[in-house]
Amino acid sequence: MDLKQFVEQLEQLASQAEQAFLAADSAESFEAARIEFAGAKSGQLKAIQKQLGSLDQADRPEGGKKLNEAKARIQAALDQATERLGGEGGKARKAIGPMVDPTLPGASFHLGTTHPITQTIEHLKEIMGRLGFAPVEGPEVEDTWHNFIALNIPEDHPARDPLDNFYLSVAGATAIDANASEAKLLRSQTSTVQIRVMENQQPPIRIISLGRVYRPDEADMTHFPMFHQMEGLWVEPGVTMAHLKSVLRMFATSYLGEDVTIRFRPSFFPFTEPSVEVDYLWNDNWVEFGGAGMVDPNVLRAVGYDPEQVTGFAFGLGVERLCMRRHRVTDIRDLFRNDLRFLHQF
Ligand code: PHE
């Protein structure tokens, strides 16, 4: 082939390509033109390029130059068409609409939810709020004054045993001294918050406190070394046991339903006198939900109140047990395994 023929072919090809790209009005026609003229394997430009080798040695530089010019023209036409159709290759498809079939069934998107215990806490706050109890918070790391002493639990009381509590080790000490004044522990009950509130406020007091407590219990279907309690405290002149029973009954029917049966059993706590345990009837079994009673005069004195002037009641209920009863959860451990198949049900 001579140079003249070679250049003519190039000219012709470039013009054809320019026209084809100019005429392209869809992703399909654009793609067809691209393959025909600029395709890496079977494109016409490629075919002509192969003939460069058959030119006379002397003509080859000129042939190469013309080839590059034709290439540049074709590329420019391609670029213009790309832009006109809305972006490069993939984007050009937009010219004919998105490649999504809106009639196909989709997979649902599972949004996260709050944990069942968090939901329960919110619910309990809402019910108690209607009865006039304001929520307050207290620390989870406590000193022995708030966890025991002010609650009328003396030094030799078994509830203070290191085996029944999570004491924190004191820097420099070789063994845990549960009775050391600086001893700290993960609170074993939310009754600590009663003391903290009464130390800082004068009656009337009507609060609840919901939060974690810790006890070194073996985990089984009904026990876990960390769980939540709802503490309630109402202190003001004239509060009686009748108020306590009414509040707990109203709370139980609000949370569990009108048909719940509730029972108060005489019991003992160092910080209440008299004391009761609160049971709800569940599946024909009595289940203990917590303790309650009239605030012991010693506790009122410990926070500087005059037991001749004010009386009060307190209660502490297990949040997990309430949640489990309402949602028919039978194993407390399910609440803390974080198995999404379980959690997605709430
Ligand atoms: N703090 C007690 C417990 O953890 C419950 C309780 C609270 C009892 C308030 C009486 C009054 O078991």
Image (cartoon, rainbow, N blue to C red):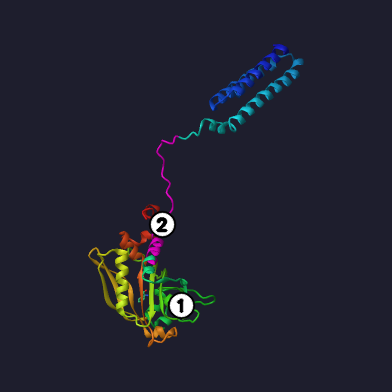
Q: Quadrant of ligand 1?
A: bottom left
Question: Three-letter amino acid code at disc 1?
Answer: Arg
Q: Is residue 166 left or right of residue 267?
A: right
Asked where in the image residue 166 lies, by quadrant, the reply is: bottom left
- Circle on res. 196: 1
Q: Answer whether residue 141 is magenta in the image.
A: no
Q: Position of residue 12 (x, y in %)?
A: 66, 15
Tell me if residue 71 comes above or below residue 185 in the rendering: above
Q: Considering the image in quadrants, where does the N terminus appear?
A: top right
- Residue at figure coordinates x 41%, y 59% from the top left: 115
Question: Three-letter amino acid code at disc 2?
Answer: Asn
The one nearer the camera, 318 or 248, is 248
Give, as a single range, the part of the protein colored magenta: 101-125
Q: Nearer the viewer, mark 2 or mark 1?
A: 1
How many residues crowd around disc 2 within 10 Å: few (fewer than 14), some, or many (20 or more)? few
Q: Position of residue 46 (x, y in %)?
A: 63, 20
How many residues crowd around disc 1 within 10 Å: few (fewer than 14), some, or many (20 or more)? some
Asked where in the image residue 40 lies, by quadrant, the reply is: top right
Q: Which residue is mark 2?
A: 338
Q: Considering the image in quadrants, where does the C terminus appear?
A: bottom left
Asked where in the image residue 318 lies, by quadrant, the reply is: bottom left
Task: For residue 178, say whether it is visible.
Answer: no
- Circle on res. 185: none
Q: Secondary structure at mark 1?
A: helix
